[in-house]
Image (cartoon, rainbow, N blue to C red):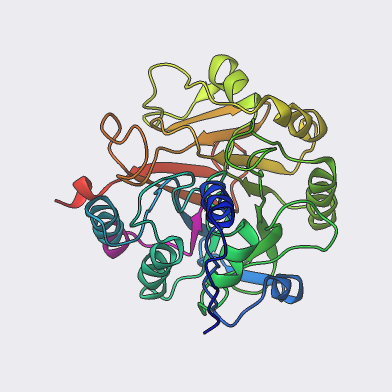
């Protein structure tokens, strides 16, 4: 282990300042390097015999160290949900860990390990779309993803030259190998100035990457990223609600205005069937607008602001790949540990 001498009060002050902005601790070493995401093989998963593919979505757990009271409660309830919920893919849709915190017990990689070990115990493929908090302290999104690469069922990928830490497709095929659907994982970025600046937004080269992949596949696609776009509010006001699912009495403010670029450039694409986000810490909603579903999930952890008002839950999305309309292509269900009490 390398040791450093205390050289001056100025140096100590600088280190303290760095730690406040997410640079004070060395990322845990899993033996993997972020560059490995560029070499990950393409992923193909199978729908069932009826053409149904089930995705369990978790977001906004805001874990601090994996062992504090809130984290233990969050992980215990996630275990209850996973024990009772059959799915083909788990998507951790951002803010796995807390970002800017002065909590001295904060341990980003211990929290990630506790979460990952729970996921691995089910041997179900799982992945991660970075949230705005995940790279704000003790390492970047790239560092966290490199750490997660040690887990055998963790899926990851990216294309060099594209902004963001995670962009890849998970193709869903029939039992005889026909491509039926695809899932796109996208990084919606974090802040323009780490920890303190305004929210950043999805960039043009990310959108171009998405559109190229979608148009090549020519099948419906479900897109998952963390921070919603302005079109979510439009869908809420002008779209058709999914029966029984939207629990919000009013649309929660939280769209990232810069994501208007994403809305503008994808609005007419005939293949994008679902855009699913989190971030807002509200309850659930799902609306069909312009022949596309916009689905916003509730928070999933007791470490998230708002958990006193909205009970943590997950979203189970069943994709009916053989459906003859967008309206019937998806089934949405809010799933909480209370459902199995």
The reply to whether the magenta stretch includes residue 85 is yes
The reply to whether the magenta stretch includes residue 165 is no
Query: What range is drawn magenta here?
Result: 81-92
Given residues 301 and 210, the one toward you in this image is 301
Left or right, residue 22 beside residue 158: left
> How far across and down, in percent of the image, does residue 339 sit?
21, 47
> Is any atom of residue 111 visible in this view?
yes
> Is any atom of residue 130 visible in this view?
no
300 w.r.t. 237: above or below: below
* The quarter of the displayed image where residue 72 is located: bottom left
* The quarter of the displayed image where residue 155 is located: bottom right
What's the residue at 36%, 29% (across, down)? 244
325 w.r.t. 321: above or below: above
Given residues 259 and 284, the one toward you in this image is 259
Given residues 324 and 170, the one toward you in this image is 170
What's the residue at 36%, 35% (across, down)? 305
107 w.r.t. 314: above or below: below
């Amino acid at each position: 282990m390398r040791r450093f001498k205390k050289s001056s009060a100025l140096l100590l002050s600088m280190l303290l300042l760095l730690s406040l902005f997410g640079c004070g601790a060395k990322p845990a070493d899993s033996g993997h390097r972020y560059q490995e995401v560029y070499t990950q093989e393409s992923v193909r998963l199978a729908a069932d015999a009826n053409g149904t593919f089930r995705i369990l979505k978790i977001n906004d757990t805001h874990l601090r160290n994996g062992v504090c009271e809130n984290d233990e409660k969050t992980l215990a309830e996630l275990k209850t949900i996973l024990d009772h919920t059959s799915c083909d893919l788990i998507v951790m849709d951002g803010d796995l860990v807390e970002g800017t915190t002065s909590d001295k017990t904060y341990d980003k990689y211990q929290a990630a390990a506790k979460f990952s070990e729970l996921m691995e115990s089910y041997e179900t493929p799982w992945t991660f779309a970075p949230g705005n908090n995940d790279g704000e302290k003790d390492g970047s999104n790239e560092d966290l993803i490199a750490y997660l690469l040690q887990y055998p069922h963790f899926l990851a990928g990216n294309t060099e030259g594209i902004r963001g830490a995670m962009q890849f497709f998970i193709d869903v095929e029939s039992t005889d190998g026909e491509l039926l659907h695809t899932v796109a994982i996208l990084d919606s970025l974090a802040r323009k100035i780490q920890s303190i600046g305004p929210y950043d937004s999805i960039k043009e080269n990310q959108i171009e990457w998405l559109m190229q992949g979608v148009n090549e596949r020519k099948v419906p696609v479900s897109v998952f990223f963390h921070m919603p776009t302005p079109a979510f509010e439009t869908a809420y006001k002008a779209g058709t609600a999914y029966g029984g699912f939207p629990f919000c009495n009013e649309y929660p403010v939280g769209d990232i205005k810069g994501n208007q670029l994403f809305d503008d450039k994808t609005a007419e694409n005939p293949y994008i069937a679902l855009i699913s986000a989190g971030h807002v810490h509200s309850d659930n909603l799902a609306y069909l607008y312009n022949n596309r579903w916009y689905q916003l999930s509730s928070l999933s952890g007791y470490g998230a602001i708002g958990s006193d008002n909205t009970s943590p839950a997950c979203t189970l999305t069943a994709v009916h790949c053989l459906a003859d309309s967008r309206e019937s292509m998806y089934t949405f269900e809010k799933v909480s540990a209370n459902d199995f009490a």
